[in-house]
């Protein structure tokens, strides 16, 4: 078994000395027993080729603009680590997602009946606002009358522009500047309503696409959360969407999602990615083309780079790394960390709304997103490297992002290595409970994630629950959202997972 897995890990291609090789597989390549054996060890697994089951058209920016465009959302500034002060309509967030106002025709002025903009199928906010989100989504199956769209006037039409249209145009220009100069994202969306009720078609497609459904589905027989009785209010394990513009993990970069630990196991599927900027390097080699995904509309094919993400799928000779991670030596001086995601007002997306400028570094891999996933044994080294904090915990505060130079220095000073995952549309990344991880998007991307509670990782869930309880009461992670004690009790009552 270990020899077969080591052979599979060679697909990760050339690795830096501080990187471990994840296991890249097709949907039918690992049995449930294989998954269990790897999962118990904490090995990161990436399952590819899921776009057909996801029905990719449902996840494209145009779908959201047409069918949920007037839903108010809270937009997050990744570099500053805070939400923008005002909510946006979802259509404005996605308007520049594919660059250069690709979807301007959906905002063109017409009679205001919303037909061209697709607003006949859009839902307004229901008015509920909990201070962190812009309201609750309206189910896609219940059409709502749309408000009058905010249109940008045509050149030379100033005389015919109403004060309302002029104000709307000014507001959009302000938002467009934010898109171009910040790293913006929607996280944990929808914020509170059940995904299955709000977006039933999307939910159905994701459930169909989920690998290892015995673990990952809500009713999976190996998902311990499914042992809760039907009259028990279940924990919110998702799905949740994460839609973000491109960023960078070069020196001074802020990343897309800061280093953190989830309370349970997680699987994250990339459903869509915008084209990479023209400045990004591409790999047109025979090996890259031979290993391209069969998904005709995949990000890999669209960018003519196949699996050029540092050789994600190449069969070149490489150090595959070890499946079992050894204990690490003590961490070094905490003052070494310099990439804590400091806020910056410098342009983050190359100034054109089409994604980060990748020309700054020749060795940036051509992939939509990259993950750094640290095994639980590195937690002490990570905390020491990031440094002490007066409130909370260096990891659980989710305030630090490790740039490429940071990761290299961390390894040299403490020996801590991370799984480096390159993700493209149709790829599902499995993150074992207890593993601190962070994400950088190299392209604007739409992802959807689901949490689950596996028997193999329950000890790590318990450790995390104890760490969360030790946080100050005002800390957002101090609340037991997973309800682990209840899950364990009912698992015992209902019998062990078979």
Image: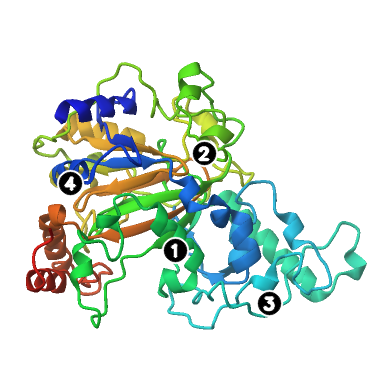
Q: Nearer the viewer, residue 27 or 280?
A: 27
- Distance of label 3 from label 1 (alpha carbons): 24 Å
Give the labeled residue for mark 2.
Answer: 295
Would residue 81 be visible to someone looking at this image?
Answer: no
Which image quadrant: the C terminus?
A: bottom left
Would residue 39 be visible to someone looking at this image?
Answer: yes
Secondary structure under tag 4 reads: helix
Report the disc number at residue 36. 4
Eyeballing the image, is 270 above or below 452? above
- Distance of label 4 from label 2 (alpha carbons): 28 Å
Mark 3 or mark 1: name the one nearer the start of the chain: 3
Q: Which quadrant would residue 479 be assigned to in this image?
A: bottom left
Q: Residue 117, percent across and down?
A: 72, 65
Mark 1 or mark 4: name the one nearer the start of the chain: 4
Between circles 3 and 4, the one closer to the viewer is 4
Q: Residue 214, percent across and down?
A: 25, 56
Report the disc number at residue 203. 1
Crowd around label 3: few <14 · some 14–19 · many ≥20 (10 Å): many
- Distance of label 2 from label 3 (alpha carbons): 35 Å
Between circles 3 and 1, the one closer to the viewer is 1
Between circles 2 and 3, the one closer to the viewer is 2
Q: Residue at x 15, y 31 (%)?
A: 1
Report the disc number at residue 146. 3
Crowd around label 2: few <14 · some 14–19 · many ≥20 (10 Å): some
Mark 1 or mark 2: name the one nearer the start of the chain: 1
- Distance of label 1 from label 4 (alpha carbons): 25 Å
Q: Is residue 171 left or right of residue 365?
A: right
- Distance of label 3 from label 4 (alpha carbons): 48 Å
Q: Which quadrant would residue 204 be assigned to in this image?
A: bottom left
């Amino acid at each position: 078994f270990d020899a077969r897995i080591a052979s599979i890990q060679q697909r990760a291609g050339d690795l830096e000395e501080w990187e471990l090789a994840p296991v890249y597989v097709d949907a039918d390549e690992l049995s449930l027993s294989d998954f269990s054996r790897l999962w118990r060890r904490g090995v990161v697994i990436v399952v590819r080729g899921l776009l057909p089951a996801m029905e990719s058209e449902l996840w494209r920016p145009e779908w959201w603009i047409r069918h949920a465009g007037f839903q108010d959302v809270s937009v997050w500034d990744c570099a500053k680590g805070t939400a923008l002060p005002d909510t946006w309509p979802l259509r404005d967030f996605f308007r520049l997602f594919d660059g250069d106002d690709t979807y301007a025709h959906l905002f063109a002025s017409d009679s205001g009946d919303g037909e061209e903009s697709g607003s006949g199928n859009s839902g307004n906010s229901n008015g509920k606002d909990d201070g962190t989100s812009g309201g609750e989504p309206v189910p896609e199956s219940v059409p709502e009358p749309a408000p009058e769209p905010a249109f940008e006037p045509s050149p030379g039409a100033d005389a015919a522009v109403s004060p309302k249209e002029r104000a709307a145009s000014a507001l959009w220009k302000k938002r467009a500047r934010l898109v171009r100069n910040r790293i913006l994202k929607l996280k944990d969306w929808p914020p509170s309503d059940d995904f299955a009720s709000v977006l039933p078609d999307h939910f159905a497609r994701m459930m169909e696409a989920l690998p290892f459904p015995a673990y990952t589905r809500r009713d999976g027989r190996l998902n311990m959360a499914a042992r809760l009785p039907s009259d028990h209010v279940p924990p919110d394990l998702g799905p949740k969407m994460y839609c973000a513009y491109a960023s960078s993990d070069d020196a001074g970069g802020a990343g897309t999602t800061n280093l953190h630990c989830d309370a349970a196991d997680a699987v994250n599927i990339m459903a869509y990615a915008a084209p990479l900027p023209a400045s990004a390097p591409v790999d047109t080699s025979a090996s890259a083309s031979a290993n391209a995904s069969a998904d005709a509309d995949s990000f890999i094919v669209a960018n003519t780079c196949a699996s050029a993400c540092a050789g994600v799928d190449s069969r070149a000779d490489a150090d595959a790394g070890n499946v079992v991670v050894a204990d690490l030596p003590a961490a070094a001086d905490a003052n070494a960390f310099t990439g804590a995601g400091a806020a910056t007002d410098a342009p983050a997306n190359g100034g054109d709304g089409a994604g980060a400028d990748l020309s700054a570094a020749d060795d940036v891999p051509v992939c939509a997103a990259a993950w750094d996933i640290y095994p639980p044994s590195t937690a002490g080294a990570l905390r020491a490297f990031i440094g002490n904090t007066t409130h909370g915990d260096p990891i659980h505060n989710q305030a630090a992002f490790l740039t490429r130079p940071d990761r290299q220095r961390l390894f040299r000073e403490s020996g801590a290595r991370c799984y480096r995952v390159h993700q493209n549309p149709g790829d599902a990344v499995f993150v074992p409970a207890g593993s601190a991880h962070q994400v950088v998007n190299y392209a604007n991307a739409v992802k959807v994630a689901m949490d689950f509670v596996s028997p193999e990782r329950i000890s790590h869930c318990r450790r995390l629950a104890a760490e969360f309880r030790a946080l100050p009461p005002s800390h957002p992670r101090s609340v037991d959202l997973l309800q682990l004690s209840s899950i364990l009790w009912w698992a015992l009552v209902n019998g062990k997972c078979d």
